[in-house]
């Protein structure tokens, strides 16, 4: 799981905020749909990406209809993807 955290982009929070606003969605609404709390969304948007675990990333991506890989710093190899599962 360490590999996963190392792959999260430093600007993942900015990307999340951009996508959330593009949908016209409040933090509270996104949190509800992604099965988390508004404080977690706020923390991610402020750059505390260490809280962005795989399941939360998957939920956020599904709600915002974007690829979870948009939050990574680089394209992943097959081996890197398998290491996260």
Image (spheres, rainbow, N blue to C red):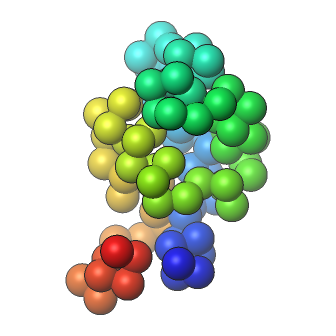
Residue drawn at 69 percent across, 38 percent down: 40
- 39 relative to 71, above or below: above
Image quadrant containing the C terminus: bottom left
Residue drawn at 47 percent across, 60 percent down: 54
Q: Could you say where residue 1 lies in the image, as x and y percent from the top left?
A: 53, 78
Q: Is residue 50 left or right of residue 62?
A: right
- 33 relative to 35, above or below: above
Residue 74: quarter of image: bottom left
Q: Residue furthest bottom?
A: 79
Residue drawn at 51 percent across, 73 percent down: 4
Most foreground residue, 82 or 49:
82
Residue 58 in sight from this viewpoint = yes
- 69 relative to 1, above or below: above
The count of marks equals 0
Q: Residue furthest front?
A: 35
Q: Could you say where residue 59 lies in the image, as x and y percent from the top left?
A: 41, 42
Residue 77 in sight from this viewpoint = no
Residue drawn at 59 percent across, 75 percent down: 6
Q: Residue furthest top?
A: 24
Q: Could you say where residue 10 lies in the image, as x and y percent from the top left?
A: 64, 59
């Amino acid at each position: 799981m360490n590999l996963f955290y190392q792959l999260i982009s430093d600007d993942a929070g900015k990307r999340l905020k951009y996508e959330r606003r593009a949908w016209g969605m409040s933090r509270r609404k996104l949190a509800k749909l992604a099965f988390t709390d508004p404080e977690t969304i706020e923390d991610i948007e402020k750059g505390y990406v260490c809280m962005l675990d795989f399941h939360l990333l998957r939920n956020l991506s599904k709600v915002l209809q974007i690829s979870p890989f948009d939050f990574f710093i680089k394209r992943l190899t097959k081996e890197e993807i398998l290491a996260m599962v």
